[in-house]
Amino acid sequence: MQAAVKLPYHKTMATEILRTMGKRVRVLREEHGWNQIELAAEVRRRGVECSNSMISSVETGRANPSLEVFVAIADALDITLDYLAKRTDKIESPDAAPVEPDPGYSQPALT
């Protein structure tokens, strides 16, 4: 029998953050009365490609989606990224003002 391989601290910490983020997404999605399909549709309404299977993977901590997906999820759920990333237990920032996306902005291509 092989001994368990100990992951580096940063990998275990990242895994724990993803799990916590997933739990928070699930709880808030349910509070909104949405299923995973409806949350994925809300994310897509914000111009970000997302499927219900991506939402499922996020909620179970199995996915490591792009920052763009996390921002769209946070926007859809009306929460801060700090709350989603477990940096605070405050859902909303009292002095945060909504930021409208720049309609002329296009994401640069990755090379």
Image: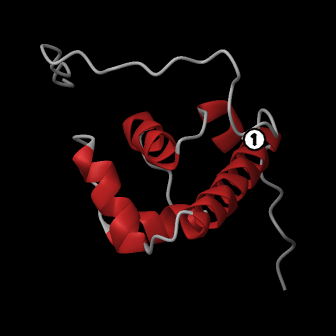
Q: Is residue 52 above or below residue 103?
A: below
Q: Is residue 105 above or below residue 56?
A: above
Q: Residue furthest bottom?
A: 1
In the rendered image, which quarter contains the N terminus? bottom right
Q: Is residue 16 above or below residue 87?
A: below
Q: Amino acid at mark 1?
A: Lys
Q: Does residue 12 appear to the left or right of 37 in the view shown?
A: right
What residue is at 51 percent from the left and 49 percent from the top? 77
Q: Residues within 10 Å of mark 1 (few under 14, many from 20)?
A: some
What residue is at 76 percent from the left and 53 percent from the top? 16
What residue is at 18 percent from the left and 18 percent from the top? 108
Residue 62 visible in rendering: no
Between 62 and 27, the one nearer to me in the picture = 27
In the rendered image, which quarter contains the C terminus? top left
Q: Position of residue 48 (x, y in %)?
A: 26, 44
| Image-quadrant location for residue 22 | bottom right
Q: Does residue 64 appear to the left or right of 6 in the view shown?
A: left
Please give the residue where the numbered disc 1 appears in the rendered image.
Answer: 86
Q: Secondary structure at mark 1?
A: loop
